[in-house]
Amino acid sequence: MQTSNDMRAARFVAGVGSVVALCILGDSLMYSILPLAAPELGIALPLVGVLLSANRLIRLLSNSWAGALFERWGPRRPFTAATVLSLLTTSLYMVGSVFGLFLVARAGWGIAWSALRQGGYTAVWTGSGRVKGRLTGLLWGLVRFGSASSVLVGGVIFDNYGYRAAVGVIAGVTALAMPVALTLPWDKMTPHADGPQRTPGVASLRAGWRDVIVNPARRSLTLAGMTGHLVNGIVLSTTSLFLAARLADGAQFGLLGVGALSGLMLGTRWMSDMVLGPAFGYLSDRIGQPNTALMLALVYAVAMVGVVALPTGLAVAALLLVFICDGGIYIAVSAAATGAALRAPSPHQFVAVFTTATDGGSALGPLLAFSLAQAVGLPTLYLVGGALVLVMVAAYWRTARVSTA
């Protein structure tokens, strides 16, 4: 950090990131324990996919709502309201046996997340251009730390005390976000002079979609990002079921039960963004984002074969490698999207299109996962997913070699 203003921005981003990290605890926990608790709650597995996708589907609409609210009212009121909403939705997870109420809670969380994420971007904009990357890393590092902590701690509580105890503890910790959110100095922190311009309207958004469709480089990049999020959603939402199938009923992996081991796997995915993100970013700067993404996609596909074919201990190690590579692909493709946006006719609208496409992939992943798993089995689903990621990243790599996004 170079100046006192940048230091103030870093402290502000840390505060905002802490609130978001606390708010995301309940959502992250659901990916670890809801598939395991579904029989106890009386929820069929295909409906688990619906629940895990509902928050992402609503975001396809609520992202634009959040932007409009932030422009009209400023960040304080929408961000604080989103914090309250996240606490309410996490608390509602305890009444998981009522499917309709659970679905409302998941959709409510999606709306809250749109505003929380918008608040995160707004906080990053308070820093100067030379520290935007570091502020972004700080923000998402804190958020990923929250996700990882939730699945690890929540998984242990679930194994020992059950579903409602795990959700109750996580909801109690989420409540700590409220005093922090109320004390954030939004009024004293304004966007830096080199921050973003006002978001264009609906006509420009349509033009952004048209540009992505007709431009081969931006189209292949967007499809690679969407596919990565789609397969990531499938794997994340079925990890606990895969581990339960590989381990004997009631067996332990070392000292860990299925819930805790699933939490460890999911925690690795989120922690890899925090710990290895800078290294992946540095690598992509050195050898290029397309080369980095392709290299990681190759390892990803091979590791997915290992997940299916290797003995249990090695399969778990291969699954860890899958999650680490997924984090690296996310960093490389996101960095490429940032550069592509600057070369697009409307940078803001390319980012809007890219994020909406990846949100759509994330939403479809859990929605398709359980139905497809019942139809073809998890091993086949994982192998096809790994191959699909490799094919789409390779298509992006090939297009990037012959054209400039």
Image: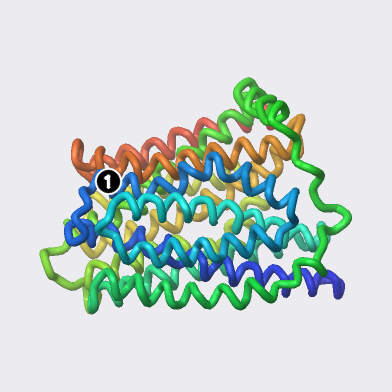
Q: Position of residue 146 (x, y in %)?
A: 50, 70
Q: Quadrant of residue 131?
A: bottom right
Q: Total marks drawn?
A: 1
Q: Please rate how many residues cluster around mark 1, counting C-alpha atoms within 10 Å: few if below 14, some from 14 to 19, many from 20.
A: some
Residue at image position (36%, 60%) is: 30
| Residue 163 at least partly seen | yes
162 relative to 175 in the view: left or right: left
Q: Position of residue 163 (x, y in %)?
A: 27, 69
Report the quarter where the C terminus lies.
top right
| Residue receiving disc 1 | 47
Q: Secondary structure at mark 1?
A: helix
Say what amino acid the circle numbered 1 marks.
Answer: Leu
Residue at image position (69%, 76%) is: 183
Q: Position of residue 394 (x, y in %)?
A: 50, 34
Residue at image position (62%, 68%) is: 17
Which residue is more in the foreground, 128 or 119?
A: 119
Q: Please name the colour scheme applied to the rendered image.
A: rainbow
| Residue 288 at least partly seen | no
42 relative to 54 in the view: left or right: left
Rendered position, 355 above or below 398? below
Q: Quadrant of residue 219?
A: top right
Report the quarter where the N terminus lies.
bottom right
Q: Which residue ends up furthest to the left in the rendered image?
A: 249
Rendered position, 341 above or below 236? above
Q: Which residue ends up furthest to the top in the rendered image?
A: 214
Q: Position of residue 313 (x, y in %)?
A: 23, 65
Residue at image position (11%, 64%) is: 248
37 relative to 22 in the view: left or right: left
